[in-house]
Image: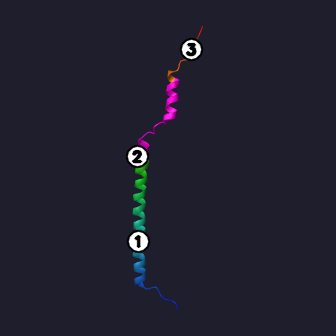
Amino acid sequence: MGTSLTPEFWERFVLLLFAAMGATIVLTALFDALALRIARRRAQTPPAPPAAQARPRLAARNHRTPVSR
């Protein structure tokens, strides 16, 4: 037994469709702005060099090779 789709159904369908589209657009914009803010915040702070790599560089700068004549 088939049922016909009434005009009331189509009105509610369109209303819910546009509500879902609006919610999707708003949430997408919100998450996009949040991701952009996080990316910019990470780019502003330079990464600190690990302690293990910093020591050999300082030792290499202070080391002088002896030269004998």
The residue that label 3 is drawn on is 66
CA distance separating discs 2 and 3 = 47 Å
Q: Main secondary structure of the magenta part?
A: helix
Q: Where is residue 54 shown, x and y percent of the image? A: 49, 31
CA distance separating discs 3 and 1 = 79 Å
Task: Give the magenta-colored segment's residue range.
Answer: 41-60
The residue that label 1 is drawn on is 18
Q: Residue at x 39, y 58 (%)?
A: 30
Q: Where is residue 66 shown, x and y percent of the image? A: 56, 14
Give the vertical position of 60 relative to 7 (above or below).
Answer: above
Q: Residue at x 46, y 85 (%)?
A: 5
Is 15 magenta? The answer is: no
Residue lying farthest bottom? 1
Mark 1: few/some/many CA within 10 Å (<14, 14-19, 20+): few
Q: Secondary structure at mark 3?
A: loop
- Residue 42: which numbered mark, if any? none
Q: Where is residue 57 shown, x and y percent of the image? A: 51, 28
Tell me which numbered mark, 3 or 1, is placed earlier along the sequence: 1
Asked if labels 3 and 2 touch by Cβ distance under 8 angstroms, the answer is no
Q: Residue at x 42, y 51 (%)?
A: 36
Asked if labels 2 and 1 touch by Cβ distance under 8 angstroms, the answer is no
Q: Secondary structure at mark 1?
A: helix
Q: Residue at x 42, y 68 (%)?
A: 21
The residue that label 2 is drawn on is 41
Q: Secondary structure at mark 2?
A: helix
Give the vertical position of 52 relative to 3 (above or below).
Answer: above
At label 1, the amino acid type is Phe
Q: Where is residue 32 shown, x and y percent of the image? A: 43, 56
Q: Quadrant of residue 23?
A: bottom left
